Image: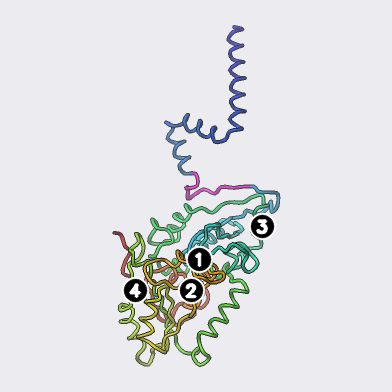
Amino acid sequence: MLDLKRMGYLKYLLQSKIRCFLEQKPKLNYLQRVIRHINDDAFVNKVLLLGNDPNAFYMKSYGERNPERNILFIEINAMMGYAYRYILYALWEAERFGFTPVIRFNEECAYLEDHPVNGTRNPFEYYFQQPADISLDAVYESKRVFSFEIAHLYRIEKELGNLNPETPVGYVVTETYLSDLAQVARKYIRLNQVTEKIFAESKEKLFPKNIRSKRILGIHVRGTDFALNWQNHPNMVMPEEFFSVIDHLLEGDAAFDYIFLATDDSSRLNVFKERYGKRLFYYEGVHRGDGAQNIALSVLDRENTHYLDGLEALRDVYTLAECNGLIAGLSQISIAARIVRLAENGPFEYMKILDKGIYQG
């Protein structure tokens, strides 16, 4: 009897020592738990869902500030058109659940410079104001911080009623979907003062005074790496396919007077210049590609070139949104422009999306 008690006590001591040891070695502790539960399907599924559960929010506590606020920390690494909608998805989620949103473009963002721009090291704040009254610095001192995860996009895509839940923030959109996101944009998206000033001055320089009251047709042409036929990306629309629609709209009593062209491809720009001459307006001094490489993968020799890449893309979005009409292929920039237009000015007078489908080769 004593031997059994002694063995039980020794077992208890051994287990206590092992437990203390494993508490000091979290990775080893994790491995032993996984091994012990290798045949437990419920445990395996829970582990696999970590960071991938569209219905779960994980909370971190960085300090004691804002104990009554549930902060939704939104970290993004994406090109501007995609990032704009990613932000709106997260803000839509924050609105529904009563979170206070704070947004950061992370260290892998293509627009990040190695020094502050416009007084900040957060590329999101290069261009925008934070949507709420909590700063990025305050997040890292706050008590209740929840992370917005990529996995949430899949659920939100379905809840917004969009048509491509397997490819969130995809290219197939409905008018109801755009209208819902426009409401979010109207409430939360605010350009910062520097960006607003640059955009206003750019548009004044682009359109002479005698042009600003005329009817302008916005065109977005996506080129460069779209020629490579990326999986789950739109098939490229060729210039000639735009011309057949544009030419018709430049004639008659209700014709558009001028064209604004936004494109990432210098060869496409040259073709449009040859065809439309003085009726064509476009931003000069812009980073455009000449070939099948995305401009994000090339670097211009200019000061703050990464920041300017994002600024030029966003400027295209807002300039397209101010045009009277829009013709575009399937693209992130054109979808963002449609959302901004609905948020700020209502529907376009005329709109045509040249949809050649999504590449599934």
Earlier-in-chain disc, 2 versus 4: 2
Mark sitting on residue 84: 1
**Residue 339 to residue 153: above or below:** below
Earlier-in-chain disc, 3 versus 1: 1
Q: Which three-letter amino acid code belongs to the residue tagged 1? A: Tyr
Which type of secondary structure does the marked residue at label 2 adopt?
Answer: helix
Separation of residues labelled 3 and 1 (CA atoms): 22 Å
Quadrant location of the C terminus in the rendered image: bottom left
Q: Identify residue for label 2.
A: 317
Give the extent of the magenta segment. 50-60
Contact check, label 2 and label 1, Cβ < 8 Å: yes
Separation of residues labelled 2 and 4 (CA atoms): 18 Å
Q: Residue at x 46, y 64 (%)?
A: 82
How far across and how far down the image is residue 196, in percent?
59, 76
Q: Which three-letter amino acid code belongs to the residue tagged 2? A: Val
Q: Identify residue for label 4.
A: 354
Front of the two marks 3 and 1: 3
Earlier-in-chain disc, 4 versus 3: 3
**Residue 160 to residue 278: above or below:** above
From the viewer's perspective, is 5 left or right of 88? right
Q: Residue at x 51, y 78 (%)?
A: 345
Q: Main secondary structure of the magenta part?
A: loop
Q: Which three-letter amino acid code belongs to the residue tagged 3? A: Asp
Separation of residues labelled 2 and 1 (CA atoms): 10 Å
Q: Identify residue for label 3.
A: 137
